[in-house]
Image (tube, grey):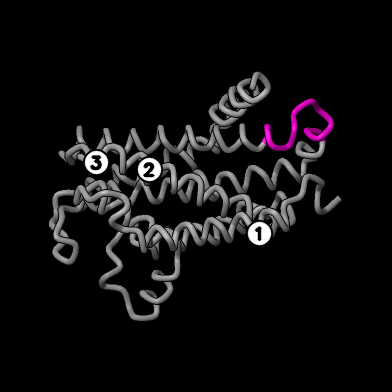
Amino acid sequence: MKLFVHQLRTEQLLFWRNREAAFFTFFLPVIFFLIFGAIYGDTDISSEHIKGSYFLEAGMIGYGVASTCFAGLGITLVVRRELGILKRVRTTPLTPLTYLSAVLGSIFIVFLFEAALIILIGRVLFGVPFPTQAFSVLVVLLIGAVCFAAMGLGISGFVRSAEGSSAAINAVYLPMAIISGTFFTPKGYPTFLKVIADALPLTHYTKVTRDVMVHGVHVWSDWKQLLVVLAWGIAGMLAALKLFRWQPREA
């Protein structure tokens, strides 16, 4: 436990000292919320029957989980693997489970802090009420963090080089974030985009988050949506078990 706590603290220090990572994985969803909230936060979205700020708050939390737990984690692990950091970790008293648990724990802390900040900004600047189902919100955040982190672990096994990690993973997560309805409602999409959106985990996760936070439903009411997210999380974990490496792949 002492090793885990020590490594967790180390991971937090490494994250916040890396200004580029902190900006793109933590602050970017917050900045997007401020920008798009200022643009159409007071507009009523007729297809969703809610104000734009209500729609955006849940969407930015969805964007945040993809940015932090999926893209941020995946890029970090690829870079550390190719620089030989993961290889050196295996020679320390840290067990692989302890190390990965600390890395994932740090990512979860960042995402939960990010979600809390978005909810606070929504309340203070855009008048979005605090969610009424606090327990369901916490469950949704934890499920999202776990499932998208599993996908982040999985995709790190497909990327071969540190130089290409950012481009390759961003090429997956940025289109997913846009198509999945985090910024704009997908109800006006062309048919082919709707088909793609319906297959993406972030679409279903954002819907669950929006239902819980905006409409005040319990998390288990959207169990079909959650099953899709969990299925993607399981697929990510299976990919990680098969492809995750501690040794540099381009050595």
Q: Can you identify the residue that label 2 sits on?
A: 139
**Amino acid type, mark 2:** Val
Mark 2 or 1, nearer chain start = 2
Q: Nearer the viewer, mark 2 or mark 1?
A: 2
- Distance between mark 3 and mark 1 Cα atoms: 34 Å
Mark 3 or 2, nearer chain start = 3
The vertical placement of 65 against 98, above or below, is: below
Please name whichever residue, 231 or 165, is drawn nearer the observer in this view of the structure.
Answer: 231
Mark 3 or 1, nearer chain start = 3
Left or right placement of residue 118 versus residue 52 in this view: right
**Amino acid type, mark 1:** Ala
- Distance between mark 2 and mark 1 Cα atoms: 24 Å
Which region shows up in magenta?
88-99
Q: Which residue is pictured at 31% across the width and 74% down the height?
A: 189
Count of marks overlaid on the render: 3
**Amino acid type, mark 3:** Gln
Q: Point out residue 6 in the picture as x, y percentages from the top left corner.
A: 64, 20
Do the residues under discs 3 and 2 have CB atoms within 8 angstroms? no
The vertical placement of 51 against 114, above or below, is: below
Q: Can you identify the residue that label 1 sits on?
A: 239
Q: Point out residue 61 in the picture as x, y percentages from the top left corner.
A: 36, 46
Please name whichever residue, 85 or 230, is drawn nearer the observer in this view of the structure.
Answer: 230
Q: Point out residue 178 in the picture as x, y percentages from the top left corner.
A: 40, 61
The vertical placement of 188 against 120, above or below, is: below
Q: Which residue is pictured at 29% across the width and 42% down the height?
A: 34
SS category of the residue bearing label 3 = loop
Q: Can you identify the residue that label 3 sits on?
A: 133
Residue furthest to the right in view is 251
